[in-house]
Structure formats: C-alpha cells, structure tokens
Image: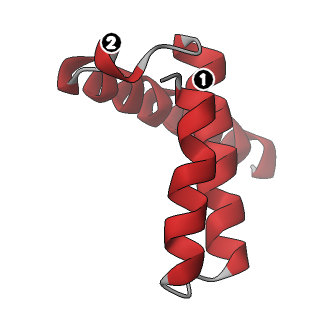
Amino acid sequence: MKLSELWLLYETDKRILSFSPYMLKAYSLQLKVLIHDVGNLDIEEVSLTLLKEYLANQSYKLGKLLRSCEWERI
C-alpha cells in the first residue's frame, strides 16, 4: 500500500476518535509534503531512518527560513 492510500484509512480512524478537522488538515498537509520530498513509497519501504532524515531536513529548512525572516525585520 502506498503512502497516499494510507491517508484515507488513517483519516477515517481519527474522525471516529473525534480528532479536530483542523488537526486532520494539518496532518494531511504534512503527509503531502512528505510524499513530495520522499516520493509515494510503499509503506514497507518507509523506515525509521528515512523518517529521521526527512524530519532533520524539514527542521533545517525551517531554521533557515526563520533566520532569513529575522534578517528582514532588522
């Protein structure tokens, strides 16, 4: 099963648990970014190392963005 197909199952489960629609939208957006960056992989291809690398990359991008915003305010 591909990452994009898993969302429907996950979303259904979380709606039953009364997750906020805003939280689900945020999760959906983050999944779209993940799929954009690593590809629409089969779930068996996703490893802890891959996710750690992805999160480290996102953290780096966010830090870079925040630093550039600080310079614009000065």
Number of numbered markers: 2
Where residue 55 appears, x then y in whole percent?
Answer: 38, 33
Q: Nearer the viewer, residue 11 or 38?
A: 11
- For the point 72% across and 44% down, the residue is 69
Q: Which one is earlier in the sequence, the residue at label 1 or at label 2?
A: 1
Q: Is residue 8 above or below residue 16?
A: above
- For the point 54% across and 81% down, the residue is 16
Where residue 60 appears, x then y in whole percent?
Answer: 45, 28
Where residue 57 appears, x then y in whole percent?
Answer: 43, 23
Within 10 Å of the Cα at label 1, are there few (<14), some (14-19), or many (20+) other Cα atoms?
Answer: some
Q: Is residue 22 above or below residue 6?
A: below
Q: Nearer the viewer, residue 39 or 43?
A: 43
Residue 35: mark: 1
Q: Is residue 18 above or below residue 60?
A: below
Q: CA distance from mark 1 to mark 2?
A: 13 Å
Tell me the colour scheme of the image. Answer: secondary structure
Name, please, the residue furthest toward the bottom. 18
Q: Give residue 27's quadrant in the image.
A: bottom right
Q: Is residue 66 shown left or right of residue 54?
A: right
Q: Give residue 34's quadrant in the image.
A: top right
Q: Nearer the viewer, residue 41 or 9?
A: 9
Q: Amino acid at mark 1?
A: Ile
Q: Amino acid at mark 2?
A: Glu
Q: Secondary structure at mark 1?
A: helix
Q: Secondary structure at mark 2?
A: helix
Where is mark 2, residue-wise? 45
